Image (cartoon, rainbow, N blue to C red):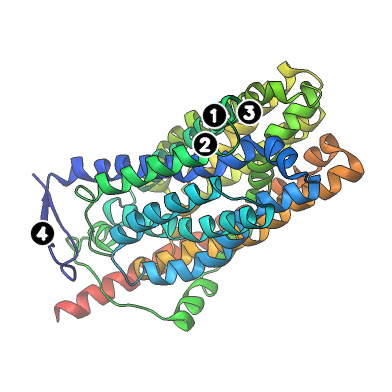
Amino acid sequence: MSTYTLDPNYPGGRPIQNLAQYKWMVVGMLWFITFFNYADRMALSANLPLVGEYFGLSDTQRGMLVSAFGYSYGMAAIFAGYIVDRVRRKSAVLFGLLIWSLICIMIGAAPSYHLLFLFLALEGLGEAFYFPAALSLVSDYHGKATRSRAMSINQTAVYFGTVGGTVAAAMLGGHFNWRAPFFVFGALGVVLALVLWRFLHEPARGAADLADAGEGGKASHRKIGWIEFFRIFFTTPTAPLLLLGFLFANSVAAITLGWMPSFILESFYDGDKTHLVAAGFLATLPLQFASMIAAPMAGLSADKFRARTSRGRIMVQCFGAACAIPFVVLCGQADTKVLVIVALVGWGICKGIYDSNIFASLYDVIRPEARGMAAGIMNLFAWAVAGVVGPIAFGYFSEIYGKRDTMSYSAALYGVAAILLFIAMWFFVGRDSRRMQAQLVAEADAQRT
């Protein structure tokens, strides 16, 4: 029976019996948190027509509401990552869940457009701590043999949360009012945070990578500052290329999350708000269900490819981004529900393939002490830039060119992402991953002597 030591820097550190079982239990616990992380976000998108009507908003103002979360989430992400690399990640995960759930309740009580915008932005601040902490924690339980699978399984909660959150929020909004889903999701998040405090444990930083190198899980506790982090990140060419690829790919995802329910409602239901639930269901289920199926399979494939070559994970990502292009074009041009479902399913499969390795690829080249900040800078660009500019730009250009053509043109963003990933895969990832592991081994040897 294998054991795994929790970080001895924190009270209560002790060996975990049967690591093979517990490391997947960690993925399961984080899965439920990720579910609510995305369900909370979708409460606004699912009820955007109702919110817009309630406050009398233009399309551009609605886009600004959608972007409020992305702006604060992205701007806070790198600072949250800096803190995550220095504190107990269990605390960052669960306190983050508690805080953003309480703010979610405040969103439901917002009496004005400006306060609604403010509370949506504050929710982004609360959620900014979650992904850097959760992904860093997973990376210390799962090494190169299972990391893509673990992160891709966690990624399926994004799709479940997006679909479940959209449909549940639309049902609650349709039967009660737009405020109801924020109250319900917020209350459930508070309960989940309290329940999981007993079961989630803090691992030693770097243990999985050192175990892969034959160092028996010996942990490194070195903390790095901003200057050293930026030196590590930007002198590792794979990392900024993955960052830019994520920025362009996530621009399309931000447009999807924010505008697809309204796009479907106007395109196939003539804007009739009595079909709000049907539009939300059609806008999310085909895309997210396809991604949910594809992501774990892509994660399994990526782990197998990674066992053969350091290019394995990015190769899977590049394939997903490139293959998504025709489906996004079709989504904008489809004139029947059948065609739009085909387009969304194809897009969802490709999106799941890409999503399965976003951070697993990054952690192949970034050392453990910098992974919180690395995830933070990824989210900074993907949300503060793509998450803000994408929805606002879509709203602006859709008033000029129409939603259909604007949606199709956004496919070009996937093309740019695929080119960047190909460059990283072909020229840099092998050297960068070997250098990172050699550094960890050298430091572990120095600690023993």
* Residue 303 in sight in this render: no
Residue 125 x %, y %: 51, 61
Q: Is residue 312 left or right of residue 258?
A: left
Q: Secondary structure at mark 4?
A: loop
Q: Is residue 316 above or below residue 116?
A: above
Tell me if 279 is positioned left or right of 146 in this view.
right
Residue denoted by label 4 = 14
Q: Relative to the observer, which residue lies in front, 123 or 52?
A: 52
Q: Secondary structure at mark 3?
A: helix
Eye-nearest disc, 4 or 1: 1
Amino acid at the residue labelled 2: Pro
For the residue marked with disc 1, what is the amino acid?
A: Leu
Q: In the image, what residue occupies the spot 33% across and 70% down? A: 438
Marks 2 & 1, CB-CB < 8 Å contact: yes
Residue 127 is situated, as x and y percent measured from the top left of the image, at 47, 55
Q: Which residue is mark 3?
A: 280
Q: Which residue is mark 2?
A: 181
| Contact? badges 4 and 1 (CB < 8 Å) | no
Q: CA distance from mark 4 to mark 2?
A: 40 Å
Q: Earlier in the sequence, mark 1 or mark 3?
A: 1
Question: Would you call the spot at circle 1 few (<14 residues within 10 Å), some (14-19), or many (20 or more)?
Answer: many
Quadrant for the C terminus in the image = bottom left
**Residue 326 percent location from the top left of the image:** 74, 34
Q: How many marks?
A: 4
Residue flagged by tag 3: what amino acid is it? Answer: Gly
Q: Examine the rendered structure and indicate whether residue 343 appears above or below residue 382.
A: above
Along the polypeptide, which appears first: circle 3 or circle 4? 4
Report which residue position mark 1 lands on.
172
Name which residue lies at 51% across and 41% down: 182
* Residue 381, quarter of picture: bottom right
